Image (tube, rainbow, N blue to C red):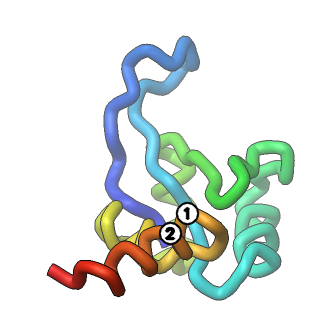
Amino acid sequence: MVDPLREYPDTGLPFSHWCHMAADSGFEELHAFAAALGIPRRAFQGDHYDLPPHGRDRAVAAGAEEVTTRELIARMAGPRGERARRRHAADPR
């Protein structure tokens, strides 16, 4: 899954727009997908990969599902996704 590009102007990196790429089926699928896109494992952020605009375009072309940031967080594997699912279960508004 990839969420929409968002501006992060103060990163000091060559790109100011980034998105997150995560998986809901576990990290092995996420790592394999990232590797197929040429993204090194060292770019893993603990539960997601950050992608610049051209990386997001390649991920979508390779089959990544475009979702909202809220949906990505709610579905993603790992502790952040688990916390989001617990919060939603406690207050499903």
Vertical placement of residue 93 versus 38, above or below: below
SS at mark 1 in the image: helix
Q: Residue 49 in the image: state x and y as whole percent.
A: 64, 53
* Residue at figure coordinates x 33%, y 32% from the top left: 7
Residue at the far left in the pictured view: 93
Q: Which residue is mark 1?
A: 80
SS at mark 2 in the image: helix
Closer to the camera, 3 or 91? 91
Question: Hey, which quadrant is residue 74 in on the image?
Answer: bottom left
Q: Residue 65 in the image: state x and y as whole percent.
A: 44, 78
The answer to whether the residues at label 2 and label 1 have Cβ atoms under 8 Å apart is yes
Q: CA distance from mark 2 to mark 1?
A: 5 Å
Closer to the camera, 59 or 23? 23
Identity of the amino acid at label 1? Arg
Residue at the far front in the pictured view: 90
* Residue at figure coordinates x 24%, y 79% from the top left: 91
* Residue at figure coordinates x 44%, y 67% from the top left: 73
Quarter that holds the C terminus: bottom left
> Left or right: where does residue 74 sit relative to residue 38?
left
> Left or right: where does residue 43 sit relative to residue 69?
right
How packed is label 1: few (under 14 Cα within 10 Å), some, or many (20 or more)?
some
Give the number of the disc on residue 3. none
Q: Residue 22 in the image: state x and y as whole percent.
A: 58, 67
Q: Which residue is mark 2?
A: 83
